[in-house]
């Protein structure tokens, strides 16, 4: 069986390729170039990543293919990213990159190369599950809960999962690094990439200013409408943000300590006003429910209403018990058992039943 492995130059995808070769697959490595606006920028690591991939493929004795998806990425992912920020929301482009580039463009390209399957270094698992004579492919959480990436994969469908292998799903990160070192792969201790792929380690505001002009406006207190300061654009701020507001030291009202930190709590896009509140536990930052749109259910079926599930309203939050209050083709209402902090329009909420990822949508 021929498997094309998406390789990024990191330890995870390198070990994914190694394990598949050890299991007897015919393995081809594929390096995707998804961004080329600023290849010479100090924050762009594409060239070094490609060197690392080539070195790993040489050690493993596998073929390397390089493909440029920059045009598709700019059209399908980056364009949406900019539109969402302009609308005052906070998108997660890595989720869109997975569904549109890694498991669509990459999958199609791999099939054209004669592949039977594709594989990536994501920490997740696929399980075939048969119920009433019908077999479906379920997206499962990884064994390593601290590295589980099923949240970023919730937009995948049955056809994509049927063609996908996640060789690292049963491993812990420390084991992956140990396997890489034992196999003589020099990337065994390479630092994990962080942040959005096309931004890298650079300051976010500096990057966004290249594409979206500043739009100065007022920062006001949500409690009493006092003028607190000025922002350079609503797109530079997200709900729950504390750093970067530059309004520290202003005294609050009687319900908050005068030195409590200020947090972004609401955006009025029409008036270009950012509203802030004082104190991490301010009621305006806590919500018991949300409505999500642009839904994707991995099985092709929506979840049951009024069943107890868990949900992640952002990647780093613990699973929160919840019920699906109402769901149709367009929208889904989710009610949490306990208040959730800083639910953010534009982010994804992902629903789980035990370790099975059911799908999710975009928070309105």
Image: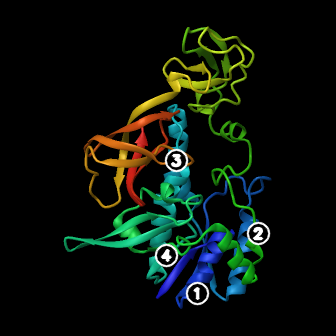
Q: What SS does tag 4 mark?
A: strand
Q: Is residue 192 left or right of residue 134?
A: right
Q: Residues within 10 Å of mark 3 (few under 14, many from 20)?
A: few
Residue positioned 75% across, 72% down in the render: 187
Identify whether 215 is placed above or below 64. above
Whole-percent x, y for residue 250 in the image: 71, 13
Is the residue under label 2 in contact with that under label 4 (CB below 8 Å)? Answer: no
**Residue 173 lies in quadrant:** bottom right
Identify whether 73 is placed above or below 132. above
Whole-percent x, y for residue 333 in the image: 33, 38
Which circle's residue, 1 or 3, is located before the other in the chain?
Answer: 1
Is the residue under label 1 in contact with that under label 2 (CB below 8 Å)? Answer: no
Find disc 4 in the rendering and name its residue.
118
Is the residue under label 1 in contact with that under label 4 (CB below 8 Å)? Answer: no
Q: CA distance from mark 2 to mark 1?
A: 21 Å
Which circle's residue, 4 or 1, is located before the other in the chain?
Answer: 1
Find disc 1 in the rendering and name its residue.
21
Residue positioned 39% across, 72% down in the render: 127
């Amino acid at each position: 069986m021929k498997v094309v492995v998406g390789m990024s130059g990191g330890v995870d995808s390198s070990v994914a390729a190694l394990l598949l070769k050890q299991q007897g697959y015919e393995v081809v490595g594929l390096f995707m170039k998804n961004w080329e606006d600023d290849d010479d920028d100090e924050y762009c690591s594409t060239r070094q990543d490609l060197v690392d991939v080539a070195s790993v493929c040489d050690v493993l004795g596998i073929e390397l293919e390089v493909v440029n998806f920059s045009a598709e990425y700019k059209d399908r992912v980056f364009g949406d990213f900019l539109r969402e920020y302009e609308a005052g929301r906070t998108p997660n482009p890595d989720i869109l990159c997975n569904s549109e580039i890694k498991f669509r463009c990459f999958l199609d390209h791999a099939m054209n190369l004669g592949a039977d399957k594709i594989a990536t270094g994501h920490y997740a698992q696929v399980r075939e599950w048969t119920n009433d004579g019908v077999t479906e492919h379920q997206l499962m959480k990884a064994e390593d809960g601290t590295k589980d990436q099923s949240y970023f994969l919730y937009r995948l469908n049955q056809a994509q999962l049927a063609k996908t292998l996640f060789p690292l799903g049963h491993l812990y990160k420390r084991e992956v690094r140990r396997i890489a070192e034992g196999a003589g792969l020099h990337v065994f201790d390479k630092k994990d990439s962080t942040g959005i792929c096309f931004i890298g380690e650079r300051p976010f505001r500096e990057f966004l200013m290249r594409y979206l002009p500043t739009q100065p406006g007022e920062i006001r207190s949500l409690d009493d409408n006092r003028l607190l300061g000025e922002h350079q654009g609503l797109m530079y701020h997200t709900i729950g943000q504390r750093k970067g507001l530059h309004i520290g030291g202003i005294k609050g009202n009687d319900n908050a300590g005068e030195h409590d930190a200020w947090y972004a709590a609401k955006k009025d896009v029409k008036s270009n006003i950012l509203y802030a509140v004082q104190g991490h536990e301010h009621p305006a930052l806590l919500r018991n429910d949300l409505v999500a749109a642009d839904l994707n259910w991995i099985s092709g079926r929506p979840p049951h209403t009024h069943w107890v599930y868990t949900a992640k309203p952002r990647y780093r939050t613990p699973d929160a018990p919840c019920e699906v209050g109402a769901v149709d083709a367009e929208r889904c209402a989710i009610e949490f058992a306990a208040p959730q902090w800083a639910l953010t329009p534009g982010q994804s909420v992902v629903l789980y039943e035990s370790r099975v990822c059911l799908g999710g949508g975009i928070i309105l």
